[in-house]
Image: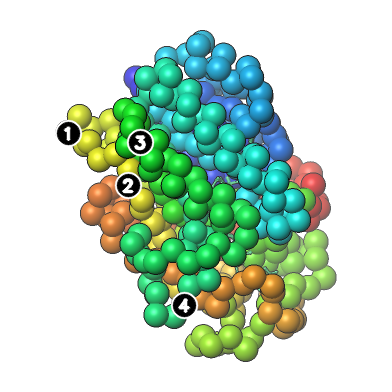
Amino acid sequence: MKTILVTGGAGYIGSHTIIELLQSNFNVISIDNYYNSIPLSYDLIKKITGKDFKKYQFDIAQDKDLELVFQENSIDGIIHFAALKSVPDSVANPIFCYQNNNNALLNIAQLAIKYGIENLVFSSSCSVYGNVAPIDLPVQENTIIRMAESPYAYSKQNGEVFLKSISEISTLKVFALRYFNPVGAHDSGEIGEFPSKHSNNLVPIITQTAIGLRDYMMVFGNDWNTRDGSCVRDYIHVSDIAEAHVLALSKLFQEDFNNKFEIVNLGSGQGVTVFEAIRSFEKMSGVKVNFKVGERRDGDVEAIYSLPNKAKDILGWFAKRDVDTMMDAAWKWQNKLIDLGFNTTKI
Ligand code: NAD
Ligand code: WQD
């Protein structure tokens, strides 16, 4: 049985990925400092899978004890999720963003090499494409990388550059997975994304409005050059993303797979507007969403969606769950959050 170190395992995508790993018979070790998560995630993972795993609480970017994890365990592969993902926070405090995201990655890469671990999956982001022009759509892995729109996006561009050069001079093999807009929650309805003081993402805001935690939500602009005037994104179910990580690791473990550094888009390939997302939610929940149309949000890109062909070719992966399924899952999770006592928009 192979052992996978998951950094940021208590977080949104990390927790869903641990479920898939445990259900695919991997051993898991998780590290998280709970900067943007709570240990309750781990209890919910155990409830869903019936399995337990080893956890550490460290700041991967700083804590010298990180090496203990590598000394104490025999690790076959690493999935590195741990990062600060809030774009506005990164604009307000770029040093913290770079220190956290880039130092953590370098610490992990250094220890991976020191302890002979050859397989690494890195959480990258569609934000690396920058302010994409209509001519770039759908974005492919070799689409020109434009200027990053935020320190966060720059930390992911940097991360990819670091890993490419590190893989070239070491035994490390890397998949950098560029997620588009992960949303939704586990099919069981038992786990999803917890409210956070750092989140301003569309789908939690829709579900919080529908359940009455917000009086209304704002649609950021209806004058974009899109089919209904609102922005277009490529929403992707968090469990589809999680499953891609299991496939990426399995590929890295394949003896005849020797590619050193591969970038792969994880998107559905479908562009969905903000109004379409709201309508899908209303259809699936039967609840009307009270929204107003406001100004465009600073830094928003008009439209971005992926060409996901490489994921299919190299990993055999494609998005199985559609937007209605994502909205249904998000609504179940919002109701579960209330049951769990989270009757708040931010914690
Ligand atoms: P998340 O904030 O829910 O999870 C990240 C986890 O890492 C959190 O639990 C946090 O406490 C932990 N963490 C952060 N810095 C740490 C450190 N120095 N030491 C230990 N733990 C640390 O975010 P997520 O949505 O699960 O995202 C996971 C990864 O995917 C991140 O790298 C993020 O940048 C990337 N990503 C996310 C999205 C998205 O929209 N959710 C899109 C593209 C890429
Ligand atoms: C989606 C759409 C908003 C809230 C962010 C990061 C990106 C990546 C994914 C990490 C946009 C609109 C939103 C609201 C709205 N994360 N919206 N009203 O901005 O596409 O991407 O998450 O790598 O780096 O920037 O996601 O969910 O914030 O917004 O109208 O109250 O919903 O304008 O068009 P975004 P989002």
**Toward which corner of the image does residue 221 lie, by quadrant?**
bottom right
Amino acid at the residue labelled 2: Glu
Label 2 with label 3: CB-CB less than 8 Å: no
Task: Report x, y in % for residue 232.
Answer: 52, 75
Say if 92 sits above or below 28 in the image. Answer: below
The residue carrying mark 3 has its beta carbon less than 8 Å from ligand 1 = no
* Extreme-top residue of the structure: 72
Q: Is residue 232 left or right of residue 43?
A: left
Quadrant of ligand 1: it is top right
Query: What element does badge 1 sit on?
Result: loop
Query: Which tag, 1 or 4, sits closer to the chain's start?
Result: 4
Label 1 with label 2: CB-CB less than 8 Å: no
Q: CA distance from mark 1 to mark 2?
A: 15 Å
Q: CA distance from mark 2 to mark 4?
A: 24 Å
Query: What element does badge 4 sit on?
Result: loop
Query: Which tag, 2 or 4, sits closer to the chain's start?
Result: 4
Which residue was labeled with disc 4? 133
Say if 298 sits above or below 340 in the image. Answer: below
**Residue 307 appears in the rendering:** yes
Which residue was labeled with disc 2? 262
Which residue was labeled with disc 1? 256
The residue carrying mark 2 has its beta carbon less than 8 Å from ligand 1 = no
Which residue was labeled with disc 3? 167
Q: Residue at horizontal 71%, vertical 58%? A: 91
Say if 49 sits above or below 213 in the image. Answer: above
**Residue 43 appears in the rendering:** no
Query: Which tag, 2 or 3, sits closer to the chain's start?
Result: 3
Query: Which tag, 4 or 3, sits closer to the chain's start?
Result: 4
